[in-house]
Image (cartoon, rainbow, N blue to C red):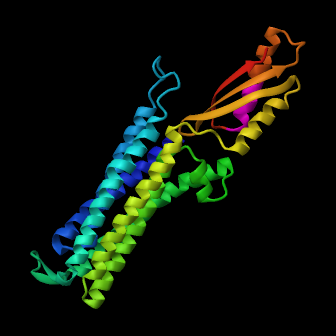
Amino acid sequence: MASGSTGVVLAALFANGAIAILKFVGFLLTGSPSMLSETYHSVSDTGNQVFLLVGIRYSGKATSRDHPFGYGKAQFFYAFLVAVLLFGIAGWESLNHGIHAIQTAGQTEAGTFTVPVVGAEYETFWLNVVILLAAIAFETYALRKANKELRSQMAEFGWETVREAFGETSDATTLTAFTEDAIALAGAAIALVGVALTRITGNGIYDAVTAAIIGLLLMGFALALAWENKRLLLGESLSRSVEQELQTAISDHPEVVHVDSFSSVFFGPQKAMVAAEVTFDPELVTGEITERIGEIEAELEATDSRVAMIYIEPST
């Protein structure tokens, strides 16, 4: 799963880095408000991927005395930083620039720029179109990569919809990359509509409004992403249905009398700890109980691949 998440992040890093440069060049040559908002967007996306890669690398550290359960939650922390530091700031800057552009929209007109090599003049509109179409192509590539990874998780764990996957997955890296790529694709499409309407009507208000919309889109995503990572940072359990399956796997063991207590918690991406207090057949001796615990642990791991750490305590 980690290798899949890394591939998703690397694909997004390549796409967003190239797009950020193209959009900034477009803004310098055209002065389009929505192109500046999209530049903020792509720069934040690129920084996002760097943070996620740091989280993936840090989470791979071996367990230690200070961190006996490992560093898996590092991915949750860095994904949370992405939401607060990158998307929140980029969203606010985009919205602020969009509002300023709306206030001065009457001064915005479609112009021309000169290509020094051939000495010809072209409307800035066409430069924006080319850049945004390139951005859509890059983002589509990155989104397909993220979607493939998310779909594989949906198939593995039986999630029927993307919305269900968002509420169930503990893979914050893939969750962040998928959402970021989808928002980036939507942002590029919105910007394209804005510059097209400005070109058709000759009124810069459309370009300015789309800049503000992109800012709101980023800020909304920042809140949603922060909320999703909050549940993981605080220590979310496996879903109720999965916990019931695991409890059934324990209680169905022929020499288990009763499951007295059961709990679970994610301590890393797709890694959960399960703890249970179990009453065994009173006729079992200590050595036999140890064997039965080993059998139950194997059964729990087979029931759900996310079960990575198990503590079973015999009731006295």
Above or below residue 150? Residue 305 is: above
Q: Which residues are magenta?
A: 296-304
Q: Is residue 224 left or right of residue 279?
A: left
Residue at 49% across / 41% down in the picture? Answer: 3
- The quarter of the picture where the N terminus appears is top right
Q: Is residue 256 left or right of residue 151?
A: right
Helix, strand or loop: magenta stretch: helix
Percent across and percent down for residue 303 are 73, 37
The quarter holding residue 307 reads top right
Q: Is residue 190 magenta?
A: no
Above or below residue 223? Residue 269 is: above
Q: Nearer the viewer, residue 278 or 72?
A: 278
Name the outermost residue toward the top. 286
Q: In this rendering, does residue 152 appear at all?
A: no
Name the outermost residue toward the bottom. 201
Above or below residue 20? Residue 314 is: above
Residue at 78% across / 23% down in the picture? Answer: 278
The quarter holding residue 259 reads top right
Percent across and percent down for residue 5 are 48, 45
Q: Is residue 140 left or right of residue 115?
A: right
- The quarter of the picture where the C terminus appears is top right
Percent across and percent down for residue 242 are 71, 42
